[in-house]
Amino acid sequence: MGKRTFVDFWIRPPDVNVAKEMCKRAFDLGYSTLVVEAPKPMLEELKSSAKEYGLEIYSKAVVSAKTRGDVLKAAAKFRHSYDVLTVYCLTRDAALVALRDGRVDTVVFRPNGFMSFDRHMLSVTRNSIELTLIDTISDRVALQKMRSIVRLIDMKDLSLVFSSCASNPVEQRGPFDVSCIVNVLGLNFERSLDALSTIPLNILLRNRAKLLGKMVQEGVWLAEG
Amino acid sequence: MARWYRRAYGLLKAKYRYVFVRYFPRDVKLDKSEIWKAILSSLQYLVGTLGYADVNPYLVRIQKDLDGIVIRCNSKQVRTLVAAIAMVNNVGGESISLDVRKISGTLKALLKKIN
């Protein structure tokens, strides 16, 4: 089996200097790909400095959704301009739509929003569920809720993406450390490593191919040469 | 525990892992014993008292030259200890992160790796 490449699926630096520091730290910790929530000009500037460290940068749009309409509007608006589209759901209605919409990549569950899972939601889930490290570390009540979500994910074989959601280098942690946290939350160790490597990488490759026109439809790729 | 004693009474040898932990950012001046206390409280919160007993953490030494500490734990519970270490975000009022730099089966090998 080849060596894993790790992805930090969500960082949100406030400015370019902090972003550069975060790139350096991510490189030190062993990540090879970063997904950054930032304005487009900042991303362009960041890409050149990330090349120094051999990191690959992807863009991410995170949309807070209160209603079904918010999710659909965001999907139509951001799908073709960002590599990753994440929906942060504030209500159960929004979560139900976001979990099954093919244009949405991940649905993030955070303590200030809607953070519970029921059988109906489980049955319609098609997209990956995203949990963040920053909530695990800072919010002790959220940790208990995360435990129950991770147990459901494990039971129903859903796909989980675990990201740092860091806004400064101090909030970043190494991939092994993060996968140990996911492991303690209730997922087996191989799957917790997948939550940081295989699953996010597949999402990124698929979306990049779609944006470049290499993938015509889900599962239909253009042959080269 | 002496080897003959373990063999005579059918006791298993306890296996340990040694973990080297360093803090980030390096320019912050911290009391290393406060780091140890923060790790213990994080561990106790994460897995409770029974889990804590399973991990059996022990502060082996404080490496002043490398700005880090060496912790010993039960080999089967090393992931739990690493998770607890990763969850520490504040020591002595300073916002820091603790990174696990190396894990080894013997102290001698660990010191060889980190030096």
Image (cartoon, grey):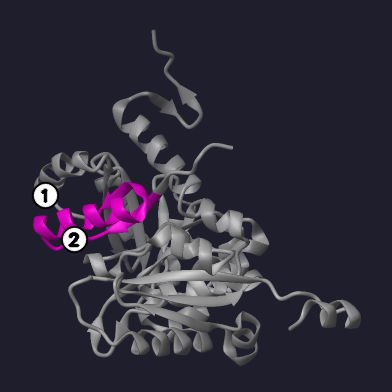
Residue depicted at x 65% and y 89%: B50
Q: Position of residue A142 (x, y in %)?
A: 44, 80
The answer to whether residue B91 of the structure is visible from this angle is yes
Q: Say which mark, if any, is on residue A42.
A: 1
Q: Position of residue A26 (x, y in %)?
A: 29, 54
**In 3D space, how far apart are the residues under numbered discs 2 and 1 (Cα atoms)?**
10 Å
- Say whether disc 2 or disc 1 marks the residue closer to the N-terminus: 2
Q: Position of residue A136 (x, y in %)?
A: 42, 75
Q: Position of residue A215 (x, y in %)?
A: 40, 26
Residue corresponding to mark 2 = A13
* Quadrant of the drawing holding the C terminus of chain A: top left
Q: Name above or below for residue A213 compared with residue A53.
A: above
Residue depicted at x 41% and y 86%: B36
Residue B60 relative to residue A86: left or right: right
* Quadrant of the drawing holding the N terminus of chain A: top right
Residue depicted at x 34% and y 56%: A29
| Amino acid beneath label 2 | Pro
